[in-house]
Image: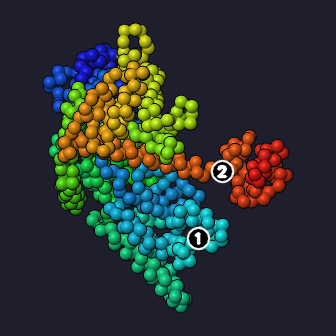
Amino acid sequence: MADPATYRPKAGEVPTSPGVYRFRDEHGRVIYVGKAKNLRQRLANYFQDVAHLHERTQRMVTTAASVEWTVVGTEVEALALEFTWIQQYDPRFNVKYRDDKSYPYLAVTLGEEVPRAQVMRGAKRKGTRYFGPYGHAWAIRETLDLLLRVFPIRTCSAGVYKRAGQSGRPCLLGYIDKCSAPCVGRISVEDHRALVLDFCDFMAGDTAKFERRLTKRMQEAAAEMEYEQAARLRDDIEALRRATEKNAVVLGDATDADVFALVGDELEAAVQVFHVRGGRIRGQRGWVVEKVEDISDAELVEHLLQQVYGSAEETEGAEARDAVPREVLVPVLPPDLDQVGAWLSGLRGARVDVRVPQRGDKKELAATVRKNAEHALMLHRTRRAGDLTTRSQALREIQEALDLESAPLRIECYDISHTQGTYQSASMVVFEDGLPRKSEYRSFSIRGADGDGARDDTEAMHEVITRRFRRYLADRLRSNDVEISAGDDGEDDPAGTLPGGEVAADAPQEKGRFAYPPSLVVVDGGPPQVAAAKRAMEELGITDVALCGLAKRLEEVWVPGEEYPVILQRSSEGLYLLQRVRDEAHRFAITQHRRRRSKGMTASVLDDVPGLGPARKKMLLTHFGSLKRLRAASVEEIASVRGMGDKTAQAVVAALNA
């Protein structure tokens, strides 16, 4: 653990302006991001007597090895930059929002030439308008199916749309009048987009306009004795009403508001929000928040508003107004209410009121949202009872079994996969705090000493460990690691760092993925694989990373240089975690191996033609449409393709007819 006094900046170096600050650990990784009205006063709070700090703040400042800051013009700018950096760096000591991306939305891809309505999950994409979120995907499909009677817009995939255009025949929805079939020209692209915009207006809450329009057309058709058309319009009106009734009316004054509720304790909290548009609940969303930092309910509300509305900075017009409503009803006002209100108003392009409901229907709705939050927290605790405790216990058991100085918070596991020595692949999986961190998984193609692959698994393991830690050393040097730049040898500070710890907001300071060393390396195998990995690390001078192997047959844990294995109890949480890590590495290695093998088995006969690279091969196949047609072509026909010459064309014909 580091002493905060070793990296405390001088008081005179820290400005009194608004800004955002970052704490980094000894490896340069950002572990905490915060904002401040006055950077000097705020940072001074972290460097008081450690015993007076909150337990989680103590852990953060003793894990950190440096602090840096960026000065901005206003507190609103600090709010926006803090959100951007939290999204970018995912600091381990900032509030964690779980289950945010599991909710389905009804998405309309307005960025495409022919927009499409579909169910979409995950991160929001630019040029797409979202409605929801919904509790279940089937609820979106049911609503969409009703509305396609009135708004027959495209819902098919790109492949289906392209095939329909090529064949001149629409899909089934086009035949049953639930798609206007722009693919075959039944409607122009411009008219289809107008239909899509009407659909978006209806979903945004402007429902009465369309019902009045259809009612007028129905009455006109009946007056002209076009009774079949009038009956169809009557059914369309009924479909609109049924789609509208699926969202309960909660407020009678056509209110646009987001209603938040928060329930929890000092360790975690459940958050719920109801999205009310046009007086109706258009969507519901929820998170379980792990309070990894010392934070009050008011500060948590501020972070929550950043999480919910931060992505609205990339939207504009009607989409931004729909994303940020006129009213934001919260259980507790954020500490910087004026700045939060100004930020939200800037996103919406109009005034946004952030307040606590005091009476009437809005207060009753807030109570309902709170009940949902209470239920969500109870369900979360029931499902994950003891989960945090279990992971901590597992890491502690591994620490004790392997006699480590501290718990292995970052574990990397390696496995080798091949088919009788061919298509040799290796995997590297990463677990942090007992959970997989898939964004840092890596795969390796084994080369071997002569370029044809390794002789056996031990040579393959030696190569993988060597390549991984060689990259670690190179990345550490390239990024001016703390161990190098913080000494007394007169080295410069890292790029982008200004005197006194101040950094530019856009300074490119993040290090390579391999620049972070693991606490523990696990290899899939017994003493031979462990010895090979140990030899590779010693050759590179890596002596501060623990190593072990997990043998499949008896689940024995092998430590370098030991004659006998370490035996963990079968019911041990530590053994269970090591098994999960090993099995995940095995799964990932097999996946990469199969991908390489499939690619190798589909190699073309054109691969061996001298002078014919990937671009020319693609051009030939695009021009002729298939290998069969290319085989039937003459030298002159092949030579007429752009980029091809007579000599290469003759080589292609010779290869195809060999």
Q: Is residue 166 left or right of residue 438?
A: right
Residue 550 pos. (x, y %):
31, 39
Disc 2, SS = loop
Residue 593 pos. (x, y %):
48, 46
- Dividing the picture into quadrants, the one containing residue 539 is top left
Disc 1, SS = loop
State the residue in front, 653 or 242.
653
Residue 289 pos. (x, y %):
25, 46
Label 1: few (<14), some or many (≥20) within 10 Å?
Answer: many
Label 2: few (<14), some or many (≥20) within 10 Å?
Answer: few
Amino acid type at image mark 2: Ser
State the residue in front, 458 or 138.
458
- Can residue 526 be seen here? yes
Residue 327 sits above or below residue 82 on the image: below
For the point 51% across and 49% down, which residue is it? 595
Residue 515 pos. (x, y %):
41, 28
In the rendered picture of this protein, how many numbered marks are placed on residues? 2
For the point 32% across and 62% down, which residue is it? 135
State the residue in front, 257 or 564.
564
Task: Check the image and name the residue furthest to the top.
Answer: 489
According to the image, label 1 marks what residue?
181
- Dividing the picture into quadrants, the one containing residue 8 is top left
Disc sitting over residue 604 in the figure: 2
For the point 57% across and 33% down, which residue is it? 451
Q: Mark 1 or 2 closer to N-term?
A: 1
The span from disc 1 to disc 2 (Cα, nearest Å) is 38 Å
For the point 33% across and 68% down, which residue is it? 247
Amino acid type at image mark 1: Ala
| Mark whose residue sits in front, 1 or 2 | 2
